[in-house]
Image (spheres, rainbow, N blue to C red):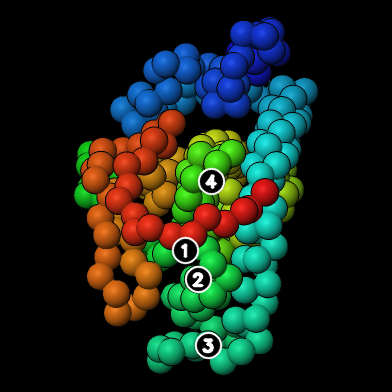
Amino acid sequence: MAYFHKEKALSNEFIGSLEEKVSAFFGELSDESDRSYDVDDDEDNGGESSDPAERTEFWQAQQSLLQEILARSTSSGSRLRREVSRAVKAARVADICRCHKPNSNGCSTCLRQAVVDQLHAAGYDAALCTSKWRSTRDVPSGMHEYIDVVIHATEKKKEARFVIELEFRAEFEIAKACDDYQNLINQLPESYVGKPDHLNTIVRVACDAGKRSMREKKMHMGPWRKRKFMQKKWSSAFQRSFSDQSPAETVLSSEPLMPDLTFNFFFPAAAAVEVA
């Protein structure tokens, strides 16, 4: 397959970042990767070959790439990841649902709020984030709620932002997907805790694998499953709030933040917390 062989031919010394490597894998130049918003996800790009060897090669490459991304994404924030895991377990044991739609694990909205509360108690600058975006020719409008944590600068480390998506793997589940896609998605963590740039790259690989799976199954791919829509959940301008009652703070930038995801924030002062 053309883009697979292109990725194999590129020397690692010319690929300075994981995002560039993914761009090369999909036959794009890294400095033009933001053009993905202008390309229709339904475009064939040459179509998929019926060659079984090519198909095997594609899915093996996807598996290898995703494993590398996940390894990099878990190399930082280990303390925060453990804290989130403890908070989720504690929230699910307790009766934390405040709304009228409880289920066996509590509703997602109340679970997120409970995790934010526990992270606050542990000293983290955590908040609920609500992203919103308008419809375009290719992407329907939508909104999404997730959690973020801002680690404020210490003497040795710069300020960093971590995105927390408690139901991350579920975001990519597709009914009647091919076995190779399901095996790929099973590698994803149930909850994502990591930096935005790693999240962006994981979403990119997972969504393009989903497109391949649906084509193999001859299924229609709804616009809400396409990469451009999925990426907007965590990259669009958002409001940050600390509780159901507290006022939200709006991100200064309203432009799509792909692929580098450079954010502009205004945050209240908070104590520095070590996460690594």
Q: Is any atom of residue 221 visible in this view?
A: no
Relative side of 28 to 205, left or right? left
Mark 1 Cα-neighbour bin, 10 Å: few <14, some 14–19, many ≥20: many
- Numbered label attached to residue 154: 4
Between marks 4 and 3, how big is the CA–CA gap?
34 Å
Question: First in sequence: mark 3 or mark 2?
Answer: 3
Q: Disc 1 or 3, which lies upstream in sequence? A: 3
Asked if the residue at tag 2 contacts the one at tag 1, i.e. Cβ–Cβ closer than 8 Å, the answer is yes
Disc 4 marks a residue whose amino acid type is Thr
Q: Which callout, 2 or 4, points to the residue nearer the camera?
A: 4
Do the CB atoms of the residues marked 3 and 2 lie less than 8 Å apart? no
The residue tagged 1 is: 126
In the structure shown, which secondary structural element does the residue marked by tag 1 occupy? strand
Which kind of residue does numbered mark 1 sit on?
Ala
Q: Which of marks 4 and 3 is in front?
A: 4
The residue indicated by pointer 2 is 120
Choose between 145 and 248: the one closer to the eye.
Answer: 248
Q: Where is residue 187 in the image (x, y as percent from the top left)?
A: 72, 49
Tell me what residue is drawn at x 22 percent, y 49 percent.
Answer: 134
Q: Determine whether the residue tagged by mark 2 lies in a helix, strand or loop.
A: helix
Q: Is residue 178 left or right of residue 196?
A: right
Confirm or deny contact between disc 1 and disc 3 (CB under 8 A).
no
- For marks 2 and 4 on the same chain, the one whose residue lies earlier in the sequence: 2
Lower position in the chain sequence, tag 4 or tag 1: 1
> Disc 2 residue type?
His
How far from the left and from the top, in percent, is residue 218?
54, 43
- Near mark 4 (Cα within 10 A), the count class, few <14, some 14-19 or many ≥20, is few
Q: Label 3, on which residue?
A: 96
